[in-house]
Amino acid sequence: MKDIKSYEFYGDNPEIFHSLVGFEIADILFTHTKEENENVVVVKCANKQHVEIDLLFKEDGIFVTEPFAVDEDLTIIE
């Protein structure tokens, strides 16, 4: 799987969400991290050009991934 970079957000950096203009929520997952087995909510946002940005809500903060290309079924394009 592709390594996806993310940015931390603690409430003082709202401009990180400006990159979501034009995106719609495509899926919401309730899962956990592999490393710490920590609960995480992943909100997958996609646009018409098949670009996805994920919002990860974890106990230690909110993380926003860099945009990445996906197929119509939201699988990552390598």
Image (cartoon, grey):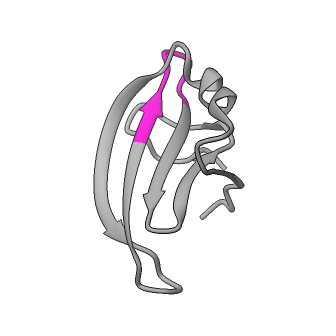
Which image quarter holds the N terminus?
bottom right
Q: Residue at x 67, y 50 (%)?
A: 78
Q: Nearer the viewer, residue 13 or 74?
A: 13
| Residue 68 coordinates in the image, percent (x, y) | 64, 39
Left or right, residue 54 beside residue 69: left
Left or right, residue 67 beside residue 56: right
Q: Residue at x 45, y 63 (%)?
A: 58
Q: Is residue 50 above or below residue 9?
A: above
Q: Is residue 61 above or below residue 37?
A: above
Left or right, residue 46 beside residue 20: left
Q: Is residue 50 magenta?
A: yes
**Total numbered badges shown on the rendered structure:** 0
Q: Residue at x 69, y 42 (%)?
A: 66
Q: Nearer the viewer, residue 39 or 12?
A: 12
Q: Residue at x 60, y 44 (%)?
A: 77
Q: Residue furthest front?
A: 12
Q: Is residue 25 magenta?
A: no
Bounds of the magenta span? 44-51
| Residue 15 coordinates in the image, percent (x, y) | 68, 27
Q: Is residue 35 above or below residue 69?
A: below
Left or right, residue 39 beside residue 14: left
| Residue 20 coordinates in the image, percent (x, y) | 56, 24
| Residue 23 coordinates in the image, percent (x, y) | 48, 20
